[in-house]
Image (cartoon, rainbow, N blue to C red):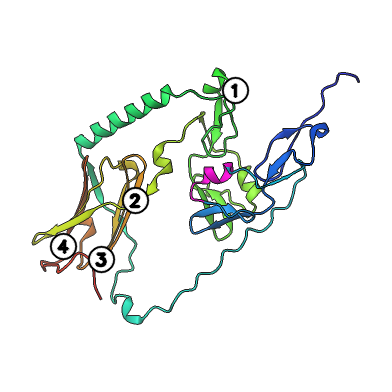
Amino acid sequence: PFGRPMATKRCTNKACGKEYLEADNTDDACQYHPGGPVFHEGWKGWSCCPKKFTDFTEFLEYKGCTRGRHSDAKIAAPAPAAAPEPIRAPIPAQAAPSGRSVKPKAELAATVSGSLRDALEKQRADAKTAEDALEVQLGQACTHNACKGRYEGPSSHVEACVHHPGAPVFHEGMKFWSCCEKNKTHDFDEFLSMAGCTTSTHRWWKPKEEAAKNKQCRHDWYQSGTHVVVTIFAKLAVPEQTSVKANEDSLTATVLYEQDSKFVLELHLAGPIVPAESTVTLASTKIDIKLKKADDKAWPQLEFQA
């Protein structure tokens, strides 16, 4: 009948997802990616575009490289482009230290100083004040994973947001969220459409720590008769996202500091240690890793040398 509203459709072309009317569907109405997603060594991109990303949200928000008509057809996702197999030179036998421990690394006991807690509390309060001063724009997208909500007015602040609090995981062709490891798929579109597992309110800006960039950070060491102390000079390390793990002869430290900086330290130690008797202290300007020696021998250097 006259006056009946026309039904809208949702475009299924990659990187589009807009609603459209068939009457308005012209030959250049849709901006999309004709290629498939590519995931390789932490990088994310589209096989049809040269640009690559480390941030998953930036990858999803990257506008299509091709113009065409909208489509609501379910299109079989092309197989992700195979990443070239890296060419590895044969490793000389003497390059691998003999007798190294194969035991998994355990998290070392950590203590957070009062000065760091106070400094972080002030930093978060300042960041919240700065965020509150920003004005949400109409149409601004929620930054929670898997949420498709956008700001449509004050009511959006209290609207339910269903999202994944975890991170995307791509492993051996499978795609899933770290918070929902039982729900896995090979299909990229199916992965993107997985409903969230947590409900809260929308988040209009991504916290700086989620967009942390890898940076170098100065570190040093000294020893006594019983311990070796490794100091990482990282200011305002975030305890919840800082990890120090070790076994008898190796150590891995992952530090998030100054809101948006990330540092990873891998050490093959020059001597044996006792992880269960080793500790970590996080202060406002540094991190001290106190490693208990397994014997009373002096170390000629911090790292093992063949």
Task: Label 3, secondary structure: give it.
Answer: loop
Q: Residue at x 32, y 50 (%)?
A: 243
Distance (Cα) linking label 4 and label 2? 29 Å
Q: Along the polypeptide, which appears first: circle 4 or circle 1?
A: 1
Q: Earlier in the sequence, mark 3 or mark 2?
A: 2
- Report, in whole angstroms, how far the alpha carbon at label 4 lies from the one at label 1: 60 Å
- Which amino acid is tagged 3? Asp
Let me know if residue 192 appears in the view.
Answer: yes
Q: Residue at x 28, y 29 (%)?
A: 122
Dot 3 surroundings within 10 Å: few (below 14), some, or many (20 or more)? many
The answer to whether residue 158 of the structure is visible from this angle is no
Report how far apart the C-alphas of labels 1 and 2 lie in the structure: 38 Å
Identify the mark nearer the N-term, 1 or 2: 1
Residue 304 position by quadrant: bottom left
Which kind of residue does numbered mark 4 sit on?
A: Lys
N-term-proximal mark, 1 vs 3: 1
Residue type at numbered disc 1: Glu
Which mark sits nearer the N-terminus, 4 or 3? 3
Name the residue carrying label 1.
152
| Mark number, residue 249 | 3
Q: Amino acid at mark 2?
A: Lys
Q: Which residue is mark 4?
A: 293
Q: Residue furthest bottom?
A: 93
Quadrant, the C terminus: bottom left
- Residue at the image point whose x is 24% and y is 53% from the top: 218
Q: Is residue 238 left or right of residue 47?
A: left
